[in-house]
Image (spheres, grey):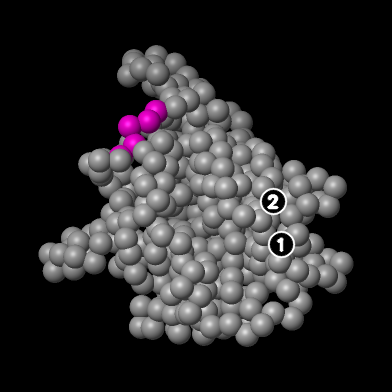
Amino acid sequence: MQSPSNPPAIDISTILATSKPDLKPYEDLYRHLHKFPGISLQEHRAAETAAKYLRDLDGFDVRTNIGGTGLIGILKNGEGKTVLLRADTDALPVEELTGLPYASKKREVDIEDGIEKPVMHACGHDPNEERGGGAKAMIADGLYDPKKHACPIPDVVLGQHVWPAEAGTIGTRPGIFGSAADSFRVTVYGRGGHASQPHTTIDPVVMAAHIIVRLQTIVSREVNPREGAVVTVGSVQSGTTENIISSEATIKINVRTVTPETRIKVLAAIKRIVKTECEASGAPKEPLWEPTSSFPFTLNDEAVTKTIATAFTKQFGDKYDPEAPVLGASEDFAILATEAPNKNGGKGVPYTYWTFGGTDPEKLRKAKDSGDSIPMNHSPYFAPVIQPTLSTGVDALIVVALSYLA
């Protein structure tokens, strides 16, 4: 999205009041996309639908199949500033339990592992954002290469995501806003045998159990309480039946940190614990480490965030939080900015990311009164109320884009 070199002065609130499109068709579109989701790397329906809608609008140059299912719509309007607005499209391998009339009942085979899984938009709607590979794939496929997909070099990259806060609210903060995330698949090796002869084996299940328990002490005993971190073991797999001691066990670990120093410390501690527990168990060989995904920190640019704060305060008033809490969640959004060529001949342009609420205010009030929790992103019950959520997201994108292009 590019602007004239010397744009006329405009009033953004006037544009919103007079030129904002009717959102009813987009509410129907939301229901359609929610009902027919696509898992990471397989978001073909969403990509095709987005491309069609962009082509139906005047002035957009649409380019598809970027790094797989990625696409861009380029709106040129002169030689001024260029703004890149990011949206993500992939769903999650979660069975939806919301009970919505447009709930997903879809199942599909995941090309990553060949397993059929339920699919749900349980987070939001960059292809492969949930697995951290969408932005990287688009960059590697020549997103900014003038001889390939030729996305104009942005002056700023901006993005947003729905969050389980009150619908109609919006928030961000300068500096660290999203955690880094690192995921690993760790295989530990034992010596298999018959369950009646455990003394002849080295049990990888027991080995994995010791590792899992010990990992829980990293955050509680090695990380400064003021520097949040999370270590999660989300999957443990070993063996095929109850009377056979298997020869290996696989542990899937996810780590979230909000400072580079803590990230280094936690990752080192995990490797130390796994290695030491394997040695203590007499493992016949070293554990196998396989990184499965990695998300960078989301580090909002101070100047860009200040500009956005001014625009959001004017548009949303007290519904805008300029010091929103740092997210424990992670994103690959920043890669579109940090890997973008800049005008100095290097890499990296400024960016800012924000969240907007999607929880029905009445449901949120009832949950607070009763002490219950509300469904978070990735929950099978996560169901953003369509309005005012959709309107808030649209307004936010219009406001920030015009703040830079005007």
Residue drawn at 45 percent across, 62 percent down? 21
**x, y percent for residue 184:** 55, 43
Quarter of the image where the C terminus is located? bottom right
Q: Are marks 2 and 1 in contact (CB under 8 Å)?
A: yes
| Residue 76 circle label | 1
Residue drawn at 85 percent across, 71 percent down? 344
* Residue 85 visible in the picture: yes
Which kind of residue does numbered mark 1 sit on?
A: Lys
**x, y percent for residue 207:** 45, 36
| Residue 61 circle label | 2
Quarter of the image where the N terminus is located? bottom right
**x, y percent for residue 57:** 58, 53
Figure check: 168 above or below 286: below
In the picture, residue 48 is in which quadrant? top right
Graded by Cα atoms within 10 Å as few (under 14), some (14 to 19) or many (20 or more), the crowding at tag 1 reads some
**x, y percent for residue 271:** 57, 49
Question: For the magenta stretch, what is the residue range?
Answer: 103-107
Classify mark 2: helix, strand or loop. Answer: strand
Q: Is 66 left or right of 192, judged from the image as shown?
A: right
Question: In front: 301, or 65?
Answer: 65
User: In whole angstroms, how far apart are the C-alphas of marks 2 and 1?
Assistant: 8 Å
Which kind of residue does numbered mark 2 sit on?
A: Asp
Graded by Cα atoms within 10 Å as few (under 14), some (14 to 19) or many (20 or more), the crowding at tag 2 reads some
Classify mark 1: helix, strand or loop. Answer: loop
* Residue 266 visible in the picture: no
